[in-house]
Amino acid sequence: MFFRPGTRPRHFPEQLHRTPRFTRRSRCLLSAGCVGTSSIGEVQLISHIQDRRMSRGRGARRRLPPDKPDTESFDDAVLEEVKQLFNKVREYSAPPGDQWCLPDPGAVLRDRPWSHPPLQALKESLNEVKNQLSDKDLAVWHQHTCSTNRAGTVTSNLRDTVNAELCTQAWAKFYEIQGSFQLLPETALRNCELNSVHLCEAPGAFIAALNHFLQTSRLHCDWTWAANTLNPYHEANGRSRTIADDRLIAHTLPWWFFGSDNTGDIMLLKHLLELQVSTIRENLQLFTGMTAEQRNHLDRLRECAAQFYVQRFQVQSLPRKRWVCRSGSLAWGKPCQRKQMGSFNQRKEMQFKEWRQRLAHGPYQAWIEEHFQVEEGHHSVLAGPVAECDLNAWVSHVGAALPKVRSSAFCDPELLDLLNEALEERTVGVKEQPLAQTTPACRSCSIRTSSPASILNELCNQPNVASCFVMVGNRSWQDGPLPGNQRQLRFCPGPSYPEMCVSTLHDGDPLHQHELLSSVCSALCGLSEGSALVVPLCSALTRFTASLVLALHLCFRSIGFRRPVCGPPVVLLCAGFSSVPQINTILQDVLDQMRTLEPDRQLLQFAPMEELIRGSLPHFLLDLNNTVLRQQLHLLLPLQQKR
């Protein structure tokens, strides 16, 4: 959808319209799947997309595009067949003397149902083919489709020859549409100002393709874009309906619109108002039985199609410095994303198995059954304090109260799914008794896990630690044996967590968040330079807790974590305090805001998402959360097997 030049969408925040730093003469807001859905010559560009990282070292040898022949070097039969692939265009005309217009909403879907027999026959034929895909392994099927698809090398050729950013099938789809039709409004081009909105855009290939076109076509227009998609960082958005690929989103967050509740669900009316193949088995057998001559002909077709695409649509090379994500080589985004493996049937079958069966068939069983080791977590350290962080950009995000933490940008999603199901099953089975009281600690792990005394002794013995504040509210930490130099220790009020997680909200409970933040604010006010702080956590899955860890990262020289033998599931060990008054002000403002929220509202984050997903912080949180999730499953597994 495109705006009239010179206007802006009415409900977008002002921050969406500032000029980004990555373009020379264009201002970018995002573009997506709103432009069209036609395919490249009605031929599927199915390819195994791999994220090719460019060398980050200075003076490193750059990969040069391979020398490939021009399309004129191909014989006429091959060239004619390729041309037919790109000439399947259907033309629709408006009614005579009329213009295209949307129907009256009150008159939609009022006619009697009707069917088109040829289309129904095509649908049935397609479904018969799709039914034969279910038991095929994804890796084998992808290899087959990539090798037999006549346009299968178009995207890889585009990456090599024109340096296309985020080059996927969708990228090539958009560029073909743009190269075939007059997509951009002539008025906008005359006025040198283009505004666009893109819906359901993740991961952002349409945006990258439109940017490539504008940058290489010498149109010289200011381009403003905004995009919408399901927020991949929102804890309530499940993995089954959210595209987790955030390679572009992580670098362009200010230009994404997620709605007032921060979910990005465009199906909500309020967000709309705010935003204004024959058979599979035979194909596989045919491919394995192809002659050398047939394979050579197919290879020539694929090579010719790749070259023909570049020439037909006049795709020019774009320097990396003019990409939408010009800093895309940085390690931003979710640190734990896996590709799907196995056949469709296998994956669907696993979805309907209970969590213990999925665990037994997955890669985690041996790791979860293994008892905890003392050295776990010792290698994960946040070195600080952070030198560069714009605290003026810290803004609170409030949305609907979380019903459950279904996803997190800071853990292995499969572990979180397993634990959530285990907790729900366990809660149903012990309604008459609290979960924490029926979950004994693992004796083997207790022997190998650090005691409160050893943890405090380790922290107090670090150089230049004059005092140590302990926020842990569990009495076991104060009643047990303490390290020799007790004058350094000072216990202050803090949240009390059971050893076993009791809720699928995890650290997303607003009451626990308020108690934790209040305790941290009080402790920071009493710390002196060089002091240490022990902060209890049940986990750090939510953006709220991640924001708090980042705030501590700004104030301390180093932050590590340990899993104690008793009390909270994990504690943060913060050493080398350095006062940052602005942090105290921000945390106090957040605390005051939390006190004024309605019961059905919740403060979701207060640090910019850009800061939470870059540098070493997401990897530290990944290690911490995976350690906690693993131990929770380790405690639950024997009890469930016993039942």
Image: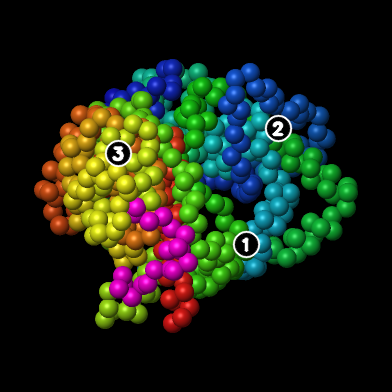
Q: Are marks 1 and 2 in contact (CB under 8 Å)?
A: no
Horizontal side, residue 47 vs residue 575: left or right: right
Q: Nearer the viewer, residue 480 or 278?
A: 480
Kindly state the secondary structure of the residue where label 1 is placed: loop
> Does 427 lie within the magenta span?
no
Please give the residue where the numbered disc 1 appears in the rendered image.
Answer: 342
Mark 3 nearby-residue class (10 Å; few <14, some 14–19, many ≥20): many
Mark 1 nearby-residue class (10 Å; few <14, some 14–19, many ≥20): some
- Residue 400's x, y, as percent? 23, 54
Please give the residue where the numbered disc 3 appears in the rendered image.
Answer: 532
Please give the residue where the numbered disc 2 appears in the rendered image.
Answer: 307
> Does 437 lie within the magenta span?
yes
To which quarter of the image does residue 559 belong?
top left
Mark 2 nearby-residue class (10 Å; few <14, some 14–19, many ≥20): many
Looking at the rendered structure, the kind of residue marked 2 is Gln
Looking at the rendered structure, the kind of residue marked 1 is Gly
- Measured Cα–Cα span from mark 3 to mark 1: 48 Å
Q: Main secondary structure of the magenta part?
A: helix
Q: Are marks 3 and 2 in contact (CB under 8 Å)?
A: no
Location of residue 576 with respect to 596 vertically, above or below: above
What range of the chain is rendered magenta?
435-453
- Residue 261's x, y, as percent? 25, 49
Q: Residue at x 42, y 63 (%)?
A: 446
Q: Nearer the viewer, residue 237 or 503?
A: 503
